[in-house]
Image (tube, rainbow, N blue to C red):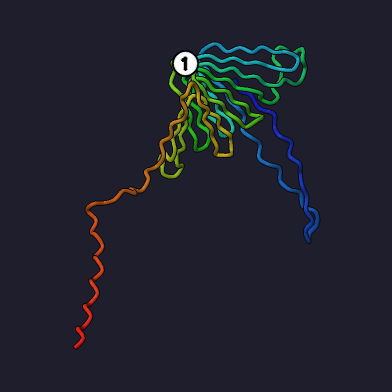
Amino acid sequence: MTFRPLLLLVALGSLTTGSGLVRAQPAPEAPPTVIECAGLSETISTDTETTAIFRDKVVVTGNNLKLTCDYLKVVASRKGDPKATIGKYGFFKTLVASGNVRIIQGDREATCGHAEIFPGEDRVVLSRLNKTGPFPSIRLVNATTGVVEYEGSGPRMILYRGERKASIEPEDGVGGRFTLPAIKDLGFNKKKAQPAADPAPAASPKQP
């Protein structure tokens, strides 16, 4: 099933050159959001909203976003004929994913048991599926070298799209854990040669 999010209106600016008025080119259209699953999918609509549910091996491919999970619930605004069985989709309000969640967004990769995505707020919230599940984790991978430059985990994580920013909230006295690149050894090296001592001052000549 394929959904096309509401496209942002692009204001056409103008400037005056020696040859006259030149119109700015519109921004390229964002790619559609494609959602696939191996299990049952269903939609429920009201006059203003449409809720879609996907089960089993869910894969979401969108604008700078790829998400896989076991269960996905999507809430979007509805437009067009309110009496239609399947209404036209407007903008996404929330995407809630559960079970083996993996999100790839640019150079960031996240894994967790439960994820909430708020497209209108450019925000992603990651948490555990239950109290016994593993903490969510994120890592930053260098797109050129493939080297992991940063890795963090914690009870509840919040990612901010486009800002290269993430925060980790503690739970029951447990906070975040970070893995960063190696730091230079600042300890004293016993094998390093000691600096030469300053020579003793010459003795003063004896007075006759």
| Left or right: 34 as drawn, with respect to 99 | right
Q: Position of residue 73 (x, y in %)?
A: 59, 17
Q: Residue at 77% of width from left, 15% of height from top?
A: 82
Dot 1: element: loop
202 or 109, which lies in front?
202
| Left or right: 123 as drawn, with respect to 203 | right
Tell me the quadrant of the picture where the C terminus can be found: bottom left
Label 1 belongs to which residue?
A: 131
- Quadrant of residue 159 within the rendered picture: top right
Give the class, few, some or many, for how many residues have Cα within 10 Å of label 1's Cα (few <14, many ≥20).
Answer: few
Please count the marks in the image: 1
Amino acid at circle 1 = Lys
Asked if 42 appears above or below 160 in the picture, the reply is above
Q: Position of residue 177 (x, y in %)?
A: 43, 31
Q: Residue at 37% of width from left, 43% of height from top?
A: 182
Q: Position of residue 64 (x, y in %)?
A: 56, 34
Q: Position of residue 111 (x, y in %)?
A: 47, 26
Residue furthest bottom as drawn:
208
Q: Residue at 46% of width from left, 37% of height from top?
A: 140
Tell me the quadrant of the picture where the N terminus can be found: top right
- Quadrant of residue 7 within the rendered picture: top right
139 or 93, which lies in front?
139
| Left or right: 15 as drawn, with respect to 188 | right
Residue furthest front as drawn:
208
